[in-house]
Amino acid sequence: MVDGTIITAALPAMASEFGDVERVSWVVASYLVASTVAAPVYGRLGDALGRRRMLLLALALFVTASVLCALAHSLLTLVGARILQGFGGGGLMVLSQAVLAENVARHQLGRAQGFMAAVIVASSTFGPVVGGALTQAFGWPSVFLVNLPLGLLAMVLLVRLPGREGSGERGKFDWPGLFLFAGSVVPLLLALEQLQRIEPTTLLGIGVSLVCLVLLGRQERRAAQPLFPLDLLRRPAMWRANAMAACSGALLVSEATILPIHLRAVDGASAGEIGLMMLPLTATVGVGSLITGRLVSRTGRVAIFPAVGQTAAALGLLLVAFGMGPVGAVLGPWGLPAMLAVVAVFQGSAMPVAQITMQSQSPPAMLGAASASVQLSRSVGSAIGVTIAMAVLFVALGRNAAIADVFADAVRHGPAALASLPEASRASAVTHIQGGFSAAFSTIALFAIANAVLAWTLPVRRL
């Protein structure tokens, strides 16, 4: 969880050093895709070979890849190291939950999950602040090096737990489904990243993705133990819950990626200031989720909370998209983070309802598969959502090559990069840059609108 949030404040610094602002979102998306693909593999191999053993392997790979990330000398090598880090990180959440369940008495699981939830909320909340402080003091590689002491401590604590032998059954994993799933997601992301310049490879990527998606559907229908529980996902409540999880991931990760770039390019915030300004967004999403969970528990109602919440979030994001300039003029650099903090309270209403819907409507024998499908949908939605939002930002800016160059300079050096421009050119550049961010946040608002439609039509109204 720390790794997922600590890098957000460092993204402008990475873009500044590598000079490739357009593709900086791949630092986020590549990790998400790799960890998503790896997660079900770790789950199955943990059952077969022993969960503690596989968690140690995942930690070792994660820590090693973190060092490679810190040593990266180009954006391409950083993305490669992030993919390797994702292959390690994919096992951390899956296997840590499994190891917890097999080492804690059943009557203590609620208390243990409370500790786990506290870790997740604290990591999500303070990750950007720590990332901003480290980046400003030691440079962006330090946000990856912090994984070394954390990872080594986790290994020491893990070795102290009793090891349990796995079942030894290795032959039933749906490997064809996994490869087809990767083949449908990765080419699609590459194609979306090229929206600014439609090329033959763009259409080829979309075609490969569609073919793999069709083949994946056929494979999952005939697999003995499918990667995706299609019988569940055909049910209206189930596919809507997964779609809500995907849109929720797209919302948060897109905001957390674009906000630091705006704070740097438009407001001139330093890395440390960016970390502090990210705090309202990351904190209030968790608050919204907690409030929704309590309301569902007290009232028994399910769909009404995300239906109202996501509608409010969509309206708020449209206000953000078209009101950034006036609000920024009045409130200054904290205006946009404050607006997003209010929006985030409402957008946090969807994810707990997606989880509750899947868990309450799944047969006991398929509870694990149903819960895993929600997490998988959230990760895929996050990767696709941030790629689309960043592509829209640069499509809007790319209509004018000179403006795109000015924007890149602003990300590297702050708005001072515009000071040397003639007055007319500076005013035009500011207008175009604000228009690009408005287009990006309008796109993010579409994710909230989709979530609202899904919630209003969710068949599960009460528990």
Image (spheres, rainbow, N blue to C red):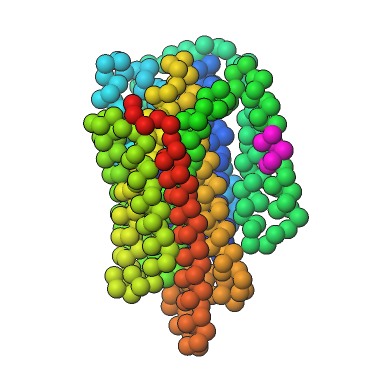
Is most of the magenta stretch helix, strand or loop?
helix
Q: State the residue at coordinates (38%, 47%).
A: 310
Would you say 37 lies left or right of 416 here?
Answer: right
Q: Nearer the viewer, residue 151 or 15?
A: 15
Q: Nearer the viewer, residue 343 or 47?
A: 343
Q: State the residue at coordinates (38%, 43%).
A: 307
Q: Which quadrant is the N terminus positioned in? A: top left
Q: Is residue 135 above or below residue 405?
A: above
Residue 226, position as x, y percentages in the image: 60, 22
Q: Is residue 296 above or below residue 268?
A: above
**Residue 117 colored in magenta in the image:** no
Residue 354, position as x, y percentages in the image: 41, 34
**Residue 213 colored in magenta in the image:** yes
Specify whether residue 390 is in view. Answer: yes
| Magenta region | 209-214
Q: State the residue at coordinates (42%, 71%).
A: 266
Identify the image quadrant of residue 212: top right
Q: State the residue at coordinates (65%, 20%).
A: 223
Residue 273, position as x, y percentages in the image: 33, 63
